[in-house]
Image (cartoon, coloured by chain):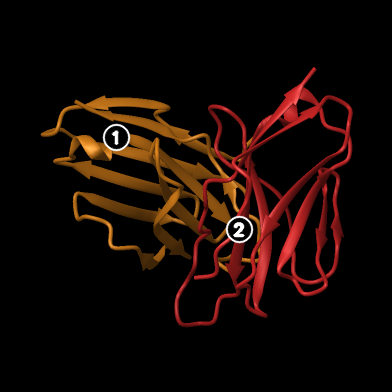
Amino acid sequence: DAKTTQPNSMESNEEEPVHLPCNHSTISGTDYIHWYRQLPSQGPEYVIHGLTSNVNNRMASLAIAEDRKSSTLILHRATLRDAAVYYCILGLMYSGGGADGLTFGKGTHLIIQP
Amino acid sequence: ETGVTQTPRHLVMGMTNKKSLKCEQHLGHNAMYWYKQSAKKPLELMFVYSLEERVENNSVPSRFSPECPNSSHLFLHLHTLQPEDSALYLCASSQDFLVNQPQHFGDGTRLSIL
């Protein structure tokens, strides 16, 4: 299985942009890049996903390197409610031979300072 | 608002008890999942159901028995559990079990085995 590497923790100030990096040097051509986050005492929450092109949604932006070996989740203006563990996950397309759930790593613990 | 509801939120049981965890989604999704989140380990996929058929079982001990009576409900029946089974059990759903589709998680059942 392709693995991801993320920093254990990061700190940022409220109302500033946050760039969360993820390395996935063994990514295959059919791996999607997913980001989820988990707030304290809650289940994980979908943030964004992409394959090759950069993606934007109301929560965040995903910047994918041209060689796809790394990606960056961008929170444009962090708030205290963005304090969570952020998971970068590679997800295989279903090939018909079996289903794949999401393989979570340890993620990055994002701390937001007021 | 999660869209996926898990009950109970907390459960304490002895090793000889039998209990069930319940998950309910009214998102119109066809795939449902059970995950286990232990204190010192990443989220682990346990079971995947698609259209009420089990499509994945990740070598989970037989003391965990899933049931999916319809596409909106998923149960995890527990019997003769061990202390190491104490964890947060999370249910998720997605439109189908293609991994490029977001998964929606409940807030989990915190299980403690005495």
x, y (%) of residue A62? 81, 55
Mark 2 and mark 1 on one chain = no
- Where on the picture, by quarter, is residue B59? bottom left
Q: Residue at x 19, y 55 (%)?
A: B62
Q: Are marks 2 and 1 in contact (CB under 8 Å)?
A: no
Residue B95 visible within the image: no
Q: Nearer the viewer, mark 2 or mark 1?
A: 2
Q: Quadrant of the C terminus of chain A?
A: top right
For label 2, the residue is A89
The type of residue carrying mark 2 is Ile
Label 2 to label 1, Cα distance in Å?
A: 25 Å
Q: Residue at x 34, y 63 (%)?
A: B58
Furthest toward the left, the residue is B16
Mark 2 residue element: strand
Q: Chain A's colour?
A: red
Chain identity of mark 2: A
x, y (%) of residue A58? 86, 45
On screen, residue B86 above or below A94? above
Mark 1 residue element: loop
Q: Chain B's colour?
A: orange
x, y (%) of residue B61? 22, 55
| Residue B111: numbered disc | none
Given residues B23 and B40, the one toward you in this image is B40
Residue A22 visible within the image: yes
User: Seen in the image, is B55 located left or right of residue B79?
Assistant: right
For label 1, the residue is B86
User: Seen in the image, is B65 located left or right of residue B32?
Assistant: left
The type of residue carrying mark 1 is Ser
